[in-house]
Amino acid sequence: MTAYLNDPEIWQESWDRQQEAFMPDREHRFAAMLDAVAAVTEGKPPRLLDLAGGTGTISLRTLARFPGAQVTVLDQDPVLLTIAESTLRDRATIVDADLSDPSWRSKLPQDGFDAVLTATALHWLPAERVSTLYAEIREVLRPGGIFANADHMPEESLPTLSDKLRDHARVKREARYAAGASTSWPDWWARVAADGQLAAKAEERARIYPPKDDHSQEWLPPAVWHVDALRMAGFSEAGVIWRGGTDAAVAGLR
Ligand SMILES: C[S@@+](CC[C@H](N)C(=O)[O-])C[C@H]1O[C@@H](n2cnc3c(N)ncnc32)[C@H](O)[C@@H]1O
């Protein structure tokens, strides 16, 4: 059992601000995904898996929107899971598992989820693994259940505009850091490493994610690649449910 943090909500808030510097429309994509979940469950509180859920941001949004939802956060980052566990306490099940290992499903408290949501995470895995993972995710959904993945998924037919959009976003982000409006990714992790309660977890994390690994793939598949991969994985329908700049959310129905 992890010792709870004194101020998990403050760490959660600073994580959200740090992530919003990359994705100013982050809440829009979460709202679009939760709209799709509400449509599938006809408004009933879902049994939802927050896959590679980090600090549990999606779980917190789910619980706020659907009181009575049963949420499970799965991740392998000891720092982020400590924040999730401390913030969510008995409102969620926390699972420590590595999605690159197909046995991740055996660690779940249940299957038959109404929804599996994931955001800004699967690009950390090689594309071949993502294709296989989609089929594994389908298996933990109930028939009719929904999977949605929001991530960097540029529009294939707009390569020049996508480059310009990314450059524009980078300039804005750097201006936010320079003005102190947000904390950058390395600065956020430096604060974690300097925190009395999180420093030991940061050391554990460095063994899982070596510091030089920046988690960015050279090839970020476009949304159409994900839609095709979902169909190949056996989802009965698949498509784009949200787009913002070079990011999108794709969904599949079991
Ligand atoms: C940028 S964070 C996003 C977290 C959360 N979804 C959010 O939107 O705030 C990416 C997450 O993916 C998780 N992740 C990456 N590879 C993973 C793997 N192989 N197994 C489990 N989690 C993984 C990381 O630990 C991290 O929490």
Image (tube, rainbow, N blue to C red):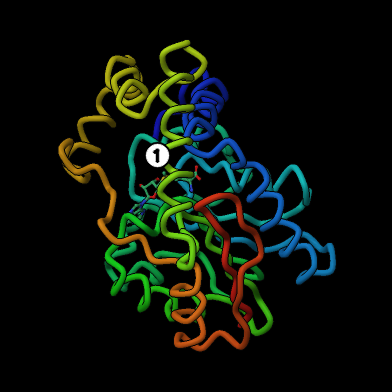
Which residue in the structure is indicated by mark 1? 1
Q: Is residue 30 above or below residue 206?
A: below
Q: Position of residue 28 (x, y in %)?
A: 68, 46
Q: Is residue 74 above or below residue 184?
A: below
> Disc 1 on helix, strand or loop?
loop
Q: Position of residue 180 (x, y in %)?
A: 47, 11
Residue in front for this viewpoint, 246 or 72: 246
Residue in front for this viewpoint, 109 or 254: 254
Residue in front for this viewpoint, 122 or 199: 122
The amino acid type, in three-letter code, at marker 1 is: Met
Q: Residue at x 43, y 28 (%)?
A: 171
Q: Position of residue 127 (x, y in %)?
A: 31, 69
Q: Position of residue 246 (x, y in %)?
A: 50, 52
* Screen quadrant of the N terminus: top left
Q: Is residue 115 above or below residue 197?
A: below
Q: Is mark 1 within 8 Å of ligand 1?
A: no
Q: Is residue 57 above or below residue 144?
A: above
